[in-house]
Image (cartoon, grey):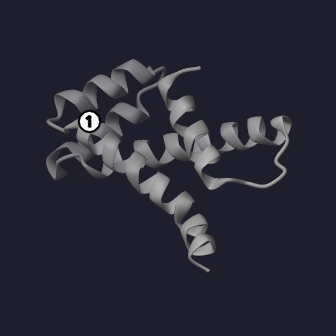
Amino acid sequence: MDQLDQFIKDIIDAKKLPGITDEAKAGLLEEMRDGLLDKINRALIEALPEEKVNEFNQLLDTPDVSDEQVQLFIEQSGVDTQKVTAQAMLEFRNLYLQGSAEREAA
């Protein structure tokens, strides 16, 4: 299990879902992983300096562009990828657990 999966598993455990089966938990983990990766990717793109957006779009339009090339472009554009990723993960966690806190307060 990688760090991202462990992060999501910890969120699911903190949510304290009653009666969730292991199969349902595995499906939820996969669904949440996709959602978290989308959130991180959006945050990284939004963090690009304005002058790099057109260049980034051109890169994405390049046939056979690899994930590594996209990642390298973002890193070399001056985006603090660790900070942006950590913030996106924190927002994701807070959003997911928001309903739990409201139930516990009631």
**Snapshot quadrant of residue 32:** top right
Q: Which residue is mark 1?
A: 81
Q: For the point 54% across and 68% down, which residue is it?
A: 101
In this picture, residue 29 sits left or right of residue 37 = right
In this picture, residue 39 sits left or right of residue 12 = left
- From this view, report whether residue 9 is shown above or below residue 16: above
Q: Nearer the viewer, residue 61 or 47?
A: 47
Image quadrant occupied by the C terminus? bottom right
Q: Position of residue 90 (x, y in %)?
A: 39, 50
Amino acid at the residue labelled 1: Thr
Q: For the point 34% across and 31% down, which residue is it?
A: 59
- From this view, report whether residue 12 is shown above or below residue 105: above
Image quadrant occupied by the N terminus? top right
In this picture, residue 84 sits left or right of residue 89 = left
Residue at the bottom extreme? 106
Q: Nearer the viewer, residue 104 or 61?
A: 104
Q: Position of residue 29 (x, y in %)?
A: 67, 39
- From this view, report whether residue 40 is shown above or below residue 75: below
Q: For the point 34% across and 40% down, which residue is it?
A: 85
Label 1: few (<14), some (14–19) or many (≥20) C-alpha neighbours in 10 Å = some
